Amino acid sequence: MRGVGTGAVPRQRQRPYGAPAPGPDARGRDPGGRTLIEHSVVEKAAARAVREVPGALVVRSRTARARVSGEVVLLRLRIGVHYPRSAREVAGRVSGHVRRRIEYITGKRVHHIDIEIAELVR
């Protein structure tokens, strides 16, 4: 069996002159890159989170609209409320739950949430 010739071995990287030697933590360093989360993903996650709140319903039209700016999310929700529950109470629970879910899923901060009660359903 023949070995690999020296012409097939890739050239090793060399440190630029004067650059510090890599330290012991160089292996655990983040290689870079970025993760982009589209507003449509945030909208779907928010609509899903609305369904998880007792007494809240998603409406027929677009339930969530999101604006993502850097690490900040702005949300606008249109929801329905089961009658005879308190609309204010349900909206408060929806706001808190959606905020926690979106911040957990995306890692971004939810700046504020506007909620419109579009339906009251029996």
Image (spheres, rainbow, N blue to C red):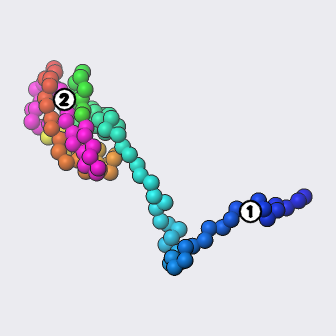
**Looking at the figure, which quarter contains the C terminus?**
top left
Instruction: Looking at the image, tell me whether mark 2 or mark 1 is earlier in sequence order.
Output: 1
Q: Nearer the viewer, residue 93 or 44?
A: 44
Which numbered dot is residue 9? 1
Kind of residue at badge 1: Val
Is 11 placed above or below 77 here?
below
* Residue 80 visible within the image: yes
In the rendering, at what x and y percent does residue 4 appear?
82, 61
In the rendered view, tell whether residue 26 sits above or below residue 92: below
Residue 62: horizontal and vertical position, in percent?
A: 25, 26
Q: Is residue 60 above or below residue 24?
A: above
Q: Give the Cα separation between the discs numbered 2 and 1.
A: 63 Å
Count residues near mark 2 (Cα–Cα under 10 Å), then give few for <14, some for 14-19, many for 20+: many
For mark 2, what is the residue? 79
Quadrant of the rendered image containing residue 78: top left
- Residue 78 lies within the magenta run: yes
Q: Nearer the viewer, residue 6 or 82?
A: 6
Above or below for 109 versus 14: above
Q: Is residue 52 visible?
A: no
Find residue 121 and report its horizontal and vertical position in percent. Answer: 16, 21
Q: Residues within 10 Å of mark 1 (few under 14, many from 20)?
A: few
Quarter occupied by residue 11: bottom right
The kind of residue tagged 2 is Ile
Where in the figure is residue 66, as x and y percent of width and height? 25, 38
Q: Nearer the viewer, residue 54 or 8?
A: 8
What's the magenta region? 66-91
Whether tag 2 and tag 1 are in contact, CB under 8 A, the answer is no
Label 1: which secondary element? loop
Looking at the rendering, in which quadrant would you find the N terminus? bottom right
Name which residue lies at 82% across and 62% down.
5
Q: Residue furthest right?
A: 1
